[in-house]
């Protein structure tokens, strides 16, 4: 219940065996003739969920970190082509943006200070108009916001950020709009109406190893315009001769790659869109019912209504200072972990330490949720007495 680590589908484990046994390197056509075809099919399936139309494409990656790095690279290359002043480039994202963006900015040689973070409120949500105001301020200072990153399912509280505002700001500044839906990609299946504008983003990260129950490591970077990835096309005399989409390694960062496409292809063939929708809806319902249970339980309070599968809640102890309450969260989490009864995570939202769950396991039932809250209550009493 603690992290974005779901149990893998049985068929994914079987696929891992086949991938290991055939040991195909998803790079050159002759080595792995199926790789490019299967990757295109699964990427097409993901693009269709996002609502991308003709001309869309993308690639499988090792996960959200790699997808975000590649999105930043493509956006930056476009800014370079446009002749932008590289010292004036800025990235606009909320202060809840995933740490992988810091890594990406650092690796791209831009530095983490390039990211200008829009502050969120005490529940981890952006205020109306905050993104637009900050972007306009930057432009007023002669800076160029070249990349806007909207997160669907923030790592801390699972919040889905307001894409329309990011899109409008990106358009008015001639910038790239990237959606980090590493977790939130699942909403395209559970709530397609709410994701109907995702197809307007230039790129989307979505991790099948988080919400499509594929075993590690399968991420994806989806592109509204597949030709954007031409900026990742390099020529090697001994290998990628054709510049053709037959080579699975064409327009990719890595050289040697596992045939992960086979795994996701088998998972999708096995469950289909309907099967995935059913499982993910159940997981969403469980998340909502956990939030309701927290509302009804004395001594705990919900930090924010869950948009995805993350639930953050805070222990309420009126007699204790904020510092001690923060400490209490850490102690309760550690004690439960050490006891082997329950694994939760802790994080910080709105300046407070909170307990956090990510309910991706469809086998977690209502009785498990009740039991979890009982464990938390017992451990809180025990740890509060020791403070
Ligand atoms: C919003 C978000 N983006 C990106 C990532 C990075 O994904 P990965 O660990 O697969 O590289 C995560 C991981 O939890 C995430 O929550």
Image: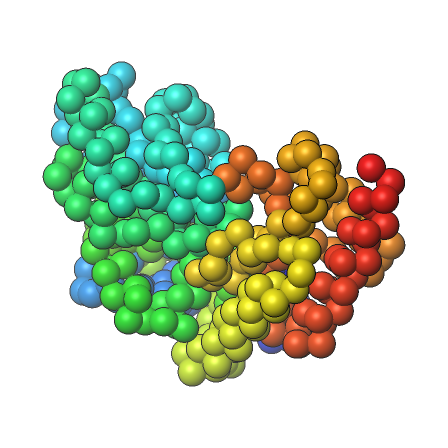
Please give the name of the residue rendered at 70% of the width and 46% of the height, measured from the top-left corner: 317
Q: Residue at x 62, y 46 (%)?
A: 354
In-front residue for pair 43/319:
319
At 27% from the left and 45% from the top, the residue drawn is 128
Q: Position of residue 292 (x, y in %)?
A: 56, 69
Classify residue 48 by image quadrant.
bottom left
Task: Give the image quarter of residue 200.
Answer: bottom left
Q: Say whether residue 205 is left or right of residue 158.
A: left
Please state which of residues 339 and 203 is positioned toward the viewer in this rendering: 339
Q: Quadrant of the N terminus?
A: bottom right
- Residue 238 percent location from the top left of the image: 41, 41
Q: Is residue 99 above or below residue 285?
A: above
Side of 19 relative to 81 (left or right): right
Protein image colouring: rainbow
Depth check: give the residue in front, 86 or 43. Answer: 86
Residue 345 is at least partly visible in this image: no
Choose top left, top right, bottom left or bottom right for residue 97. Answer: top left
User: At 35% across and 44% down in the image, what residue appears?
Assistant: 126
- Residue 100: x and y in percent read 48, 38
Residue 185 picture location, percent across and down? 41, 61
Which residue is most to the front? 319
Q: Is residue 200 above or below residue 188?
A: above
How many discs appear? 0
- Depth check, front residue: 69 or 291: 291
Is residue 160 at all visible to an observer of this figure? yes
Which quarter of the figure is the C terminus placed in?
Answer: top right
């Amino acid at each position: 219940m603690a992290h974005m680590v779901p149990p893998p589908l049985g068929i994914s484990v079987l696929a891992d065996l086949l991938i290991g046994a055939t040991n195909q390197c998803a790079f050159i056509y002759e080595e792995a003739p199926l790789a490019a075809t299967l990757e295109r099919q699964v990427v097409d399936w993901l693009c269709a969920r996002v609502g991308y139309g003709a001309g869309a494409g993308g690639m499988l990656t090792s996960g959200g970190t790699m997808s975000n790095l590649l999105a930043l690279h493509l956006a930056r290359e476009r800014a370079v082509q446009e002749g932008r002043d590289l010292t004036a480039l800025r990235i606009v994202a909320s202060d809840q943006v995933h740490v992988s963006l810091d890594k990406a900015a650092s690796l791209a040689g831009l530095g983490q200070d390039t990211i200008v973070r829009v502050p969120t409120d005490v529940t981890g949500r952006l205020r109306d108009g905050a993104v637009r105001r900050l972007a306009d301020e930057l432009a007023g200072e002669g800076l160029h916001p070249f990349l806007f990153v909207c997160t669907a399912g923030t790592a801390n509280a699972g919040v889905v950020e307001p894409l329309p505002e990011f899109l409008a700001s990106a358009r008015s500044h001639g910038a790239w709009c990237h959606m980090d839906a590493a977790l939130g990609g699942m909403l395209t299946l559970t709530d397609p109406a709410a994701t109907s504008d995702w197809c307007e983003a230039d790129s989307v990260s979505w991790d099948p190893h988080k919400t499509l129950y594929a075993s590690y490591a399968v991420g994806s970077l989806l592109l509204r315009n597949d030709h954007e990835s031409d900026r990742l096309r390099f020529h090697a005399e001994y290998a990628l001769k054709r510049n053709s989409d037959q080579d699975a390694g064409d327009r990719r960062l890595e050289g040697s790659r596992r045939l992960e496409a086979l795994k996701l292809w088998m998972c999708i063939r096995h469950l289909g869109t309907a099967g995935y929708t059913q499982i993910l809806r159940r997981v969403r319902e469980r998340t909502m019912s956990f939030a309701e249970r927290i509302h009804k339980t004395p001594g705990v309070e919900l930090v924010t209504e869950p948009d995805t599968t993350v639930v953050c809640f805070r222990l309420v102890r009126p007699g204790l200072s904020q510092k001690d309450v923060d400490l209490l969260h850490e102690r309760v989490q550690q004690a439960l972990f050490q006891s082997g009864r329950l694994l939760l995570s802790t994080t910080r939202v709105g300046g407070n330490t909170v307990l956090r769950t990510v309910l991706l396991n469809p086998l977690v039932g209502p009785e498990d949720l009740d039991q979890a809250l009982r464990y938390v209550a017992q451990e809180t009493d025990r740890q509060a007495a020791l403070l």
